[in-house]
Image: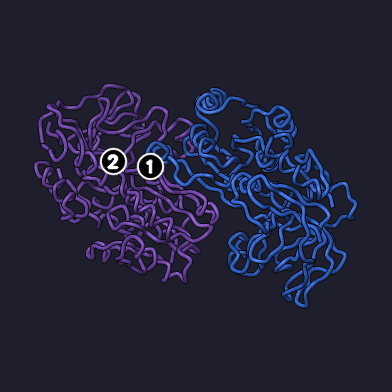
Chain colours: A purple, B blue
Amino acid sequence: MRATLIHGAGDIRTGEVPDPQIQQPTDALVRVLRACICGSDLWPYASRPATEHGDRIGHEFLGVVEDTGADVTGFQRGDLVVAPFVWSDGTCDFCREGLTTSCRHGGLWGRDGVDGGQGEAVRVPQADGTLVKLPVAADSALLPSLLTLSDVFPTGYHCAKTAGVNERTTVTVIGDGAVGLSAVLSARLLGAERIILMGRHEARTDLGREFGATEVVTERGEEGIERVRELTGGDGTHTVLECVGLEPALTTAFGVVRAGGTVSRVGAPQYDKISFGFPDFLRNITLTGGVAPARPYIGELLPPILDGSIQPGRVFDRTVRLDGVPDGYRAMADREALKVMIAL
Amino acid sequence: MRATLIHGAGDIRTGEVPDPQIQQPTDALVRVLRACICGSDLWPYASRPATEHGDRIGHEFLGVVEDTGADVTGFQRGDLVVAPFVWSDGTCDFCREGLTTSCRHGGLWGRDGVDGGQGEAVRVPQADGTLVKLPVAADSALLPSLLTLSDVFPTGYHCAKTAGVNERTTVTVIGDGAVGLSAVLSARLLGAERIILMGRHEARTDLGREFGATEVVTERGEEGIERVRELTGGDGTHTVLECVGLEPALTTAFGVVRAGGTVSRVGAPQYDKISFGFPDFLRNITLTGGVAPARPYIGELLPPILDGSIQPGRVFDRTVRLDGVPDGYRAMADREALKVMIAL
C-alpha cells in the first residue's frame, strides 16, 4: 500500500510500504478515509536527521474497519471509526482514570512497528480500547469535524478543561493555529463568555471570532501582555490557554494570567527550562496541561458535532490526496495553510 | 517598646522602637503574647546586607487587642486574636475569592511603616479583614497551636489543598521542617491514608509519623526518588507537597510524582528557572501552590485545634523571651531547633 514517509527535515515522500496485517488478537485493520497533518508533525519536518529508508508519520485518521483480531469485541468489518493520537488498552488504571496517554500497554502511531496515520491503511493495536465508532455514513459531510476528534479538538479541549475554564472565568488563548482555535471553541463550549485570542493572522483570528473569541490581540511579547492587561483592568485573565509550545508564548502566558489563575499548556514544549520562580509563586499561579488524553474526551465532544452545533472541522482550509501530502507539509510550514486534510 | 530588628545577615538584635499608635480608623493595636520565627525569616538572616538602623522583622503573632480605630467593628479591647502573615482588607475581589495574599489594599508585616510581629506590640492595618478572634483565655494551653494559624499550619494546608489531597490520593511530602510537618498533618486532615515523608532528621520525622506520615524516606536526590518509586510500584504518588523551596527539592518532586499528578510548592522559591519541559508535559504533571492565603483557612483549621483533635503547635520545640530571639534565630539556622516560639 502507499503511505507517507519522512526521510528527514523538509523531505516528505509518498512511498510503498507493506500492507498491514493483524498481528495480535487485539488488533484491527482500518482503511483510512481521512487523515491530516498536525502542527506537531512540523517539528520533525523542521529538524529530523536524514535517513535512507524513511519513517512512517501521521497520527490523526478516521476510516473503515476491514478486519479484526479474535479478541476484538467492540468493532466489526464496515464500522466507521476514529482513532485518537495515542493508542491505549482502555482497561489499565491510567485508562480508567482517563489518562490514556499514560496507558500501561499503549503507544504512539508510526513507531515500534505500528503504522503511521498518513497512509492507506493502519493496523490498530488495542482496538477495543483505542477506536471510537462514528454513527455516520462514510460520505457524511461531518467527516472533517469528526476527524478533529483524533487530536486537535481534544487537545484544545484538554487545555480549557485543565485550566478550569467555566462560565465564571475569563480566558486568554495564546496562538491562532488550529490548536489555539480549537481551544477557543472549547472554552466557549465550557461556558466562557470572555475569550481574548492572541494571534496576528487575520483569516485565523476571524475564524477564532466565529468560534467564540470576543477580542483579538495582535501584539506580541511585552506589548501583547500590556494590551491584555489593559483589556482586563490591569489584572489579566483567570485562565490562559498556551497553544504554541515555545518559551516566549509561556512567558506571555505568565504575563497575562490573573493572580490565583491557571496557565494550561498543550503546545508540545520546545524548551526544557522555564522562568517560574518567586514572582509567580507570590501570585499563586498554577501551570498545568500536557499531552491530551483524547480518547476519553471523544465521548463528550461527539454529540455537539453530530447535532451540528459546533464545526471544529472548519480548521481545515486545504485538502490534498495522498500524493499531495508533501506539498501539504510545505504549505503548513510556510503558513499558507492552517491545517491540511488528506482525503484518500 | 522593644522589638526584634535585623541589622544584616546573622545580626538580629532586640532594640527600642517607637510605640505603635492608631494611624487609620481601620487600625487596631495588638499587644503580642506569642510570636515565632519562620523558616522564611532565615533567608534574610542568611543574606540581608548590613544596615545601621535595623529593620523590623517577624510576621507570626497572636495577642490581645489594646485599642481600635473608629471604623473597626469586629474587635474590641481585650479580645484575643491571631494575625495571618499577610494583612488584608477582607472586602476586595481577591479577598472575597479567598486569595487574601493578593488583597488590593493589603501588605506584609515589617514593611512600609507597618510593624514586624516579633515585638511587644503591633499596629494592625485593616483589622477587621486581617484579625481572627480566638475563643480561649490568654493563658490557654492551646496558644502554641493557635499561633501556628498565623502561617506555618495554613501554609502546609495550602500545599495539601492546592495539590488536591483527599482520601483517594497518595502523598509525598518533601521536607521535614515545620512546614513539611504541617503539610503531613494537613494531608491527614484531608483524608490521605498514605503519606510518605522525605526527611533525614529523626526527631522531626518521628513527629511527622505522629502527625500522620506512614513511611519515611531518608535518602535524597536520585536515591530518594528511587526509594519513593520502589514504595509505589514504580509510579510515584498522586500528589507531592514541596515544602523546601530549593531547586533540588523541586527536581525530587517531579521525580516522585505519578503521571497525571500534581506538585504543590509552598517553600518560598530560591530559584528563578526550573526544568519543566517535554518529559513532564508528556506525563501531564501540574505545578501549583504559592504563598498561602492563611486568613480564609483559619476558619477551617480553628475547630480541630479547639476540640483538641490536632496539635500543630508541637512543631515548637523551643521557647525564648524577646531578648532570646537572636539566639532563637541562631538555633533555627543551625538546625538545633525546629521552630522557636517567642513568649512575651
Can you tell which quarter of the image residue B76 is in? bottom right
Q: Amino acid at mark 1?
A: Val
x%, y% of residue B131?
A: 75, 62
Q: Is residue B227 left or right of residue B208?
A: left
Q: Nearer the viewer, residue A140 or B15?
A: B15
Q: Quadrant of residue A253?
A: bottom left
- Residue bearing the label numbered 2: A81
**Quarter of the figure that contains the N terminus of chain A:** top left
Could you tell me which residue is drawn at 13 percent across and 43 percent down? A325
Disc number placed over residue A291 in the picture, else none: 1
The correct choice, above or below, for B133 with respect to B229 in the image is: below
Whether residue B71 is situated above or below residue A49 in the rendered picture: below
Q: Is residue A69 left or right of residue B189?
A: left
> x, y (%) of residue A255?
42, 59
Foreground pick, B69 / A182: B69
| Quadrant holding the C terminus of chain A | top left
Return the x and y of residue B268 as percentages of the image width and height.
58, 47
